[in-house]
Amino acid sequence: MIQEAKLRKEIMIPDSVHLTLDNGLTVKGPKGEIKKVMNEPSVKMELQGNKLVLSPSKLNKNQKRIINTCKSHINNMIHGVQEPFEYKLKVCSSHFPMSVAVDGHNFVVKNFLGEKVPRKSTILPNTKVTVQGDTVTVTGPDIEAVSQTAANIEQSTRITNRDRRVFQDGVWIISKAGQEIAR
């Protein structure tokens, strides 16, 4: 009984956030809405007032890892609907003047290293991409969608068969969710 209390996790739900458990988890807040299907049969989720309680079906180390992972995902969802996550990318071009633009659900890079065919990357749903000069900003409530969109943009300008020390052109992530990245 003592071990079960250690594995049981409680997540406080702020007043500005509405959480529902039906066919997955839906979190609504002032800055957006996120729906996720949490397919973990060994974790029982239940709402108790303004708390979400996660409890395990077994008592072992693996269950502790799974519950902590679920708790982190839910905390990110709650944080995201209150204050959206933001990734910043920098456009660097030294050999050829490259232009970037948002075209519907695609991010388009034209004239990358003098290529005739533009490179495209997918912008995931529930994210917003803006271009201002040489800075690209990706924002949204879902950290997984925002980070994957930023990674898609960075990977669209990946260079192969060239010396990376010489050809440093590309679109590079410089800030992840408010944390600067040292390169």
Image (cartoon, rainbow, N blue to C red):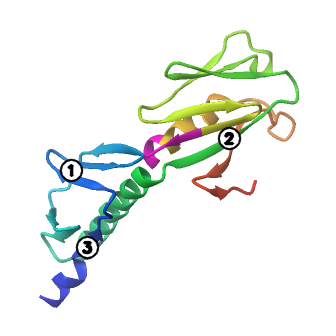
> Along the line of sight, which residue is nearer the eye, 59 or 25?
25
Residue beneath disc 3: 10
User: Which of the 4 quarters of the picture holds residue 72?
Assistant: bottom left
Disc 1 residue crowd, few under 14, some 14–19, many 20+, Cα 10 Å: few
Q: Is residue 124 above or below residue 64?
A: above
Give me the disc on residue 39.
1
Task: Give, as a single range, the part of the protein colored magenta.
Answer: 138-145
Residue 174 in the image, given as x and y percentages of width and height? 70, 48
Residue 64 in the image, given as x and y percentages of width and height? 28, 73
> Along the line of sight, which residue is nearer the eye, 78 or 167?
78
Q: Is tag 2's residue or tag 1's residue first in the polypeptide sequence? A: 1
> Along the line of sight, which residue is nearer the eye, 98 or 113?
98
Q: Residue furthest bottom?
A: 2
User: Which of the 4 quarters of the picture holds residue 8?
Assistant: bottom left
Residue beneath disc 2: 89
Residue type at mark 2 is Leu
Magenta highlight on residue 144: yes
Residue 150 in the image, given as x and y percentages of width and height? 57, 39
Calculate the distance from the C-alpha at mark 2 to the C-alpha at mark 1.
33 Å
Residue type at mark 1 is Asn
Residue 115 in the image, given as x and y percentages of width and height? 75, 14
